[in-house]
Image (spheres, rainbow, N blue to C red):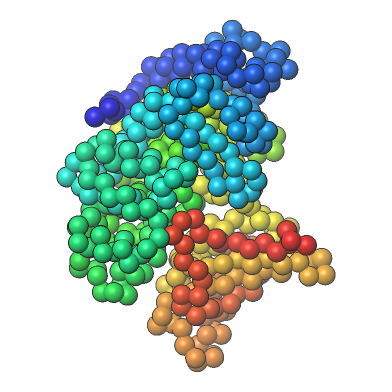
Amino acid sequence: MIWNETKECMAPDDLKAMQSKRLRKQVERMYLQVPYFRQKMQKLDLHPSDIESIDDIRKLPFTTKEDMRDNYPTGLFASPLSEIVRLHASSGTTGKATIVGYTKKDIDIWTECVARVLSMADIGRNDIIQIAYGYGLFTGGLGLHYGGENIGATVIPMSTSNTRKQLQMMEDLKCTAIACTPSYLLHLMEEVKAQGLEDQICLKAAICGGEPWTEEMREEIESQLKIKAYDIYGLSEIIGPGVAADCKEHKGLHIYEDHFYPEIVHPETLEPVEEGEVGELVITTLTKEGMPMIRYRTKDLTSLSREKCSCGRTMARMSRFKGRSDDMLVLKGVNVFPSQVETALLELPETKPYYLIIVDRVNNMDQVEIQVEVEDEYFSDEIRAMENLQEKITKALKEAIGIQVKVRIVEPKTIERSTGKSTRVIDRRKLV
């Protein structure tokens, strides 16, 4: 096994010394190997010698997804292609795809980080893990695959889709763990119940990520499947899944600070915020060779705590994500995140965790409809009962997000199920 758990319990001074050494080396390497980064430093009148410790990281320029697109495909690589052993890419759904490159050492580090995640979830050599993330250019499938093999587990590379086959493998091979998006696990959970397979499923743990999900959704999954569900975080620009994950305490996601240095800044001013305050997560890769990232703006909104976790680990923890700065909806002048809607719905016993927010603009006014599925026993043809339930949901949502919205209860299984990242918002204002 590559990783050593003691790295997750380092004394603060030792960790800072390691981070400082690695940052200096990384900045020197990028200054020499990446012309675009060198030019950005020169514009700030900076030289690698100006970076003496991790505290000097605030002197360095930020990196954004736009920088990656401007340098497409390999302009930000710090290693020649002869040393790149693998390429991954984003989907490019919001613009040109971004390409990321990995050296052999990068793959080893990535594998190590995912192994830490799985070990925190008590997954080991006696487990059978079903990987239901997409394989290919998406980092999810191969990231979890290599980590699972590293700890000696039996890995089933199922990828996404084909729910019938997923359940067949899960039942026949007695899988004890699964890795997938939380929305797809909800769909699998629904099918397990529909087919009466509850007593045939041997799952004990789920590693879920790839999209934001709430604490309430985790509790719903654990309650329905009688398993432990863990949150894994990552993004291809940094390395992939395995940048951070939560432990059994579920008191925040442990960030592997020996490889990834986190900062929280105000999304608009880009100034550091106080510990515990919500802001935008910024990550610097301290050990990545192929395509290092200095102060990459993730757009993810969270907060940091550096208190020692009750599990014993000492590295920083970030809270569950409130959302993304670019996913925030401004509705009738109020800032709203889809996660607020999800939390409110999951607190009601009548509603299912399936919803769709549809936003229109009519006569320069925002109109918001939230389509909601309810548990089968609450969906009926009795008009008065449905009106009362609709009123109850409307009231709960107004208390949660601060504005009045139109609620429409839809028939069971009306809202599309997803094998990957789910669609929660349709904002038609962007089409006007």
- List the single residue furthest toward the top: 49
Question: Is 52 positioned to the left or the right of 348 in the image?
Answer: right
Question: Is 343 positioned to the left or the right of 56 in the image?
Answer: left
The residue under the point 46% across, 83% down is: 379
Point out residue 358 in the picture as x, y percentages from the top left corner.
Answer: 64, 67
- List the single residue furthest toward the front: 82
Eyeballing the image, is 391 above or below 404? below
Q: 35 or 324, which is in the foreground?
A: 35
Point out residue 231 in the picture as x, y percentages from the top left corner.
Answer: 39, 47
The residue under the point 46% across, 56% down is: 420
Point out residue 395 in the picture as x, y percentages from the top left corner.
Answer: 58, 72
- List the single residue furthest toward the left: 126
Residue 375: name its quadrant.
bottom left
Q: 172 or 52, which is in the foreground?
A: 172
The residue under the point 49% across, 51% down is: 211
* Position of the N terminus by quadrant: top left
Eyeballing the image, is 381 above or below 425? below
* Position of the C terminus by quadrant: bottom right
Residue 299: name its quadrant.
top right
The residue under the point 39% across, 30% down is: 107
- List the single residue furthest toward the right: 363
Point out residue 321 in the picture as x, y percentages from the top left corner.
Answer: 51, 47
Q: 77 or 52, which is in the foreground?
A: 77
Eyeballing the image, is 385 above or below 43? below
Q: 15 or 99, which is in the foreground?
A: 99
Can residue 399 be seen in this snapshot?
no
Residue 359: name its quadrant.
bottom right
Can residue 405 be seen in this snapshot?
yes
